[in-house]
Image (cartoon, coloured by chain):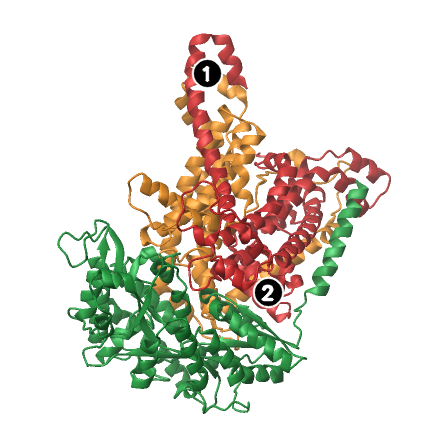
Chain colours: A green, B red, C orange
Amino acid sequence: MSRMKKIAAGTVAVLSVAALGGCAGGDDPNTIDYWLWDANQLPGYRQCAADFNAANPDLTVKVTQLGWDDYWGKLTNGMVAENAPDVFTNHLSKYPDYLRFEQLVPLDDTEVDFDRYADGLADLWVGQDGQRYGVPKDWDTIALFYNRDMLSDAGISEDEMAELTWNAEDGGTLEDVIAHLTIDSAGVRGDEEGFDKNDVEVYGMGLANSGSGMGQAEWSWFTGTTGWTHTNENPWGDHYNYDDERFQSAIAWWAGLIDKGYVPRLETTVGASMPDNFGAGKAAINSHGSWMIGQYASYDGIDLGIAPTPIGPEGERASMFNGLADSIWVGTDNLEGSKKWVEYLGSPACQDVIGDQGVVFPAILSSAERAVAAYEERGLDVSAFTEHVTDGTTFLFPITANAAQIDGIMKPAMDSILTGQADVGSLTDANTQVNRLFEDAGEDAADD
Amino acid sequence: MTTTTTIVTQGRRIRRRVTWGAVFGWICLGIAIAISILPFYWVLRTSLSMNSALAANSSSLLPVEFNLGAFARVFGLQSTEEALAQGGSGAEINFWQYLLNSTIFATLTTAGAVFFSSMAAYAFARLRWKHRDLVFGLFLATVLVPPIFTALPNFLLIKNLGLLGTMFGMILPYIFMTPFAIFFMRQFFLNMSREVEEAAMIDGASQWRIFMQVVLPNAAAPLATLALLTFMGQWNEYFWPLLVSDESTRVLTVGLGTFKSQSPQGAPDWSGLMAATLVSAVPVLILFAVFGKRIVNSIGFSGLK
Amino acid sequence: MTTSTIVLGRRGATRDGGVRTRRTRSDIKIALLFIAPALIGLILFYFVPTIRGLYLSFTEYSVLDDPTWVGTANYERLAQDPLFWNALGVTVQYVVINIVLQTAIALGLALLMQHVARSTAVRGMLLMPYLMANVIAALLWFWMLDYQLGIVNNIIEWLGLPRVAFFGSAEWAIPTQALINTWRHMGYTALLLFAGLQAIPGTVYEAAKLDGANPFQTFGRITLPLLRPVIALVLVLTVTGSFQVFDTVAVTTQGGPVNASRVIQYYIFQKAFTQLEFGYASALAMILFIILAIVAFVQMKLLRGNESDLA
C-alpha cells in the first residue's frame, strides 16, 4: 500500500507542478493572436501571416479560426476573461457594443492610407467620437446563386434570371421562377396542377435561417427595395422600423413561400447547411453573399450561375453592403506589434494575396480587381455582385448599439413567423422591445 | 436466487409459466442493453467514414469509404486543405493538449477533494464536538445549490484573483471538497470497526497520526472507489471549464463543443466530430474496463436507517 | 451527477462518534483542523459566492465596467420577462418528461435485473452511457437524430413515417433533450433502484408468497412501499439535477428553435456571458436557487423520504 501511495503522491506532485508552472496564461508577447471565422479564408490569411513574419522576424502571427456561431461568444468571453485575441476580424453589427465597453483601440495613428479603400468603407468604422476603430478588410454584397441545369430544364433563360422583378403582393417574376423550379417527388412543378407541397424533392429557393434582425442574405435584398430601412439613420441610428407595413408585408410574402412549399421549413435547417443542400441538388436558387462564391463553385456536378438580386417595386435593386475590418483589442499585450499586423492586413501586399485566392472582395480597389480576375479564371462571372457597387444600389449594414440584445429579441421573433407560430403583426411587438433598449440607454445617459 | 429454488421444488407447471416471463424479461433487457451500447458502434462507424460521402450512404451499417482521415483531423495531423477536401472541418483541435489538461484537472481535483473530504468525514464520524451535525448538514445542503448560482460569482472571484485561464484557477473550487465525497467517507467511517483505532489510542498516538496511519490505510478500498468516481465525474465536467479555461487550458469536453461549431459555413464535420467524441470517451472506457466491477458495485445507497 | 451514495443517517444511541473510552471533553480543536480545508472550500466557494451573488442581483454589471446599484430593478424586470417565464416553463417541461420517463424505465430495468439477470456484465453495459460526459451523449445523439443524415430518421422513413426534426422543431426540441438525458441516466438510476431492491430481505417476499400474493400484488403492496425511501431520494436527486440541464442544450440547440429549448440555466448563461448582464443573470440564478430549495423541501415532505418502513 505504501508503494502505491508513493506513486500516487508522486503523480500528484508532478501534475501540480505542471499545472501551476506551465499554464499560467502562457501568452508570448511576440505572438500576435488573430481570430477570424471564415474557414475558406484561412489559407489566405495564413499566407499573409507567413509573409508578415518574413518581413518582421521577431513577430509571429497565430491565426485561429472559430465558427461564426461560437466566434462572438468566445470573443466576448475572452474580453471578460482578459484573454481576448490581440487582433480580430470585426463585424459592423457587433462593433458598437465593443465600442461601448471600450474594448477597441483607436487606429488613427497607424500608417494606414484610408483613402485607398472602396468608397465609404473606411467611414463605416468611425465611431461616434470620430475616431477610427477598424481597418477595412473586405466588402460583400448579395446575389442569387442558381443551378443552370435546373434552369434550362425548366425552360427559363438566363436573361430572364438576370432581370427578375419582385413585389410583396404577388412576388413578381421572382416567385414565378421559384414556383416553376420547385418540383415535388412526382415530378410536378410548383406552379402546376397537382403539386404536392408536402412532398417536395427540389425547392425553388433554399433557406438558411430566419435572418434574425438583419437578414443580410436572407431577406434584406428584397425588403431593401421597398424604400424601407432597418433604422431611422445609419450609422448610429437609435430607432428600428420593424413595425413598418412595408417590412411586414415583405416578410409575410417570404413566409408564404414556405406555406406554398417552395421554400423548406425552418425546422429542417437545424444542423443542415443551405450551400450543401444546393450542392446536393435539393434547391435551385440560394440567396447568399459574395463570401460564399468559392464554396458554391466547389460543388461537383453543379453548373453554377450567379444572378443579381431582383428589381423591386421602386424600380431598383438593393443589396446590403457589408465590410469587415480588423480591430485591435484594448487589452493586447503587444500594441506596436498588433498595429503593424493591422497595417499589413490593410495593405495591398496582404489584400492582393487574399484577392488572388478568389474567396472575397478585398477592400482595396486594386486588390478587388484581382479577385474578380481570380474568379474569372475559374469561369465565374461575379458582375452580379460588383454591379451593386458600380450602380450605387447598396445600403449599409445597420450599425447601432445593443446588437446582442436585439439579436436575442429578433431571432426568436423571426423564427416564430417562419414556423407559423406567429404572424407578422408580432414584429410590432418585437420592435417595441427593441426600441425600448434605446430609450433606457437614453435615460441612463441623461442621468449622467 | 430464492425464485429459482422455488421453481425447482414446485414442479413443471410453474416452470413453464416462469419461462415465458423470463423470455419476455430477457427481450426487454436485451433491448435496453442494445439501446445503451449500439450508439457507440454507430459513433465508431461514422468516425471511420469519409465525411463527404456520408450524405449519400447515411444508412450503411459499415463505415462509408473507410479511412482514418477523421482521426487525423482530431489529432491535428491533417492540413487545412486536406481537411476541407475531405469535407471536414479545417479547424484545429489540439487533442493532446486537451487530453493533458483534462488529466491534470481531473487528477488534481480528485486527489485534493478525496483527501480533504476524508479528513472532514473523519471529523464528522469519529470526533465529538458541538454543532457537529449542524455543520455536516450545511455541507449536505450544498448539493441543492444549482451550479450556475455559484458559478457566476466564482468566475468573478477567479477573475479578480487574476487566475482566469490558468489550471490553478480552474481546480480551485473543486479541490477542497465535494459534498458527495464527505458523505461517502463519513458513512464508511461510521461503520468502520474501532478496535485498531482504540489500540493506537491506548498507545498514546495523536488523532492525526491515527487518521493517517491507521484509518486511511484501512479505508483503502472505499477511498479507491471514491477516487474513481470523483475522477470520472471531474473528467466529464463541462460548465465550469467552459467558463474559466482559455485555449491553453481547455479540457476535452469543452474542446468537443468547440470542434462542433468550427465548420466551414456548412454542416458539422460529422466524421471528425464522431472521431473526437470517441477519442474523448476512450480514457473513461479504459478506466471502466479495468475497474468496472468496483464501479458497478459502488452504486447504491448504503446505510439506510 | 456524481452522487451515488447517500447517508440517511439517524443518530441512534450506538452511533455517536467518539470512542468508548468515555472521553467527555470536546474534540473541537482537532476537529477544526480536520475540517479546515473542506471548510475553506465551503466558505470560499459556496457561502461567499452566495452572498456575492445576492449582492450582484441588485446591481447592473457588465464585468467590463464597474457594478452599479439598481435596487430591485432586476427582480421587477424578471417578473415581466417573457423569456424568463419561457425558460421556467421549458425547464419544467423537461423535468417532468425526464423524471417520468427515467423513473419508469429505471424501475422496470431494476426489476428486470432483480429477476432475470444480476450479472455485473449486464449492469456494466447498462451503465456505459452514464460514464460518458453529457456533451458526448449530446453529440452522439445529435448525429443519430439528424434530420437529413441521421440513422434514426432513416429508420423512421423506412417505416413509412415522415421524418422528424428532432432538434429543429419546437415540439420536439425539449422531449429530445429529455430522451437523451434518459438514455444517459436510465442504467445508472436503475442500478440505484436495484441496490434498493437488494436491500429488501427475501423473507418478506417468501411471506407474501405463502399468503398467496400474485406478482402484481407483491409489487404494489410490498416492493414499492419498501422502496419508497430509495425512490424518494432518487427523485429528489434527479429533479434537482434535471433543473440544472445545460451541457446538452449548449452543445446541440443553444436554446433554439425559437426559445423552445432555452432552459433556465442556459438563459442565465447567455445573459451573463453573451449579453454581459451579470447583475440580471445573478437575480435569475437567485430565483432558481429559491425554486429548487422549495421543490426539494416539498418533495422530501411529500414522500416522507427520511423514514423507512424497514425495521
Task: Look at the image and tell me whether residue A301 can be seen.
Answer: yes
**Which residue is pictured at 36% across the width and 64% down the height?**
C79
Indicate the position of residue B78 as horizontal and vertical percent values. Answer: 57, 59
- Which structural element holds mark 1? helix
* Residue farthest toward the right in the current orientation of the protein: B203
Indicate the position of residue B179 as horizontal and vertical percent values. Answer: 60, 49
Task: Look at the image and tell me whether residue B89 can be seen.
Answer: no
**Which residue is pictured at 65% across the width and 38% down the height?**
B291
Q: In which quarter of the image is the N terminus of chain A?
A: top right
Indicate the position of residue A57 as horizontal and vertical percent values. Answer: 67, 80
Q: Is residue A339 above or below residue C280?
A: below
Tag 1, which chain?
C
Residue annotated with mark 2: B247
Residue annotated with mark 1: C209
Is label 1 in contact with label 2 (beta carbons under 8 Å)? no
- Amino acid carrying mark 1 in the image: Lys
Taking the image as shown, residue A136 lies to the left or right of residue A284, namely right
Q: Quadrant of the C terminus of chain A?
A: bottom left
- Which structural element holds mark 2? helix
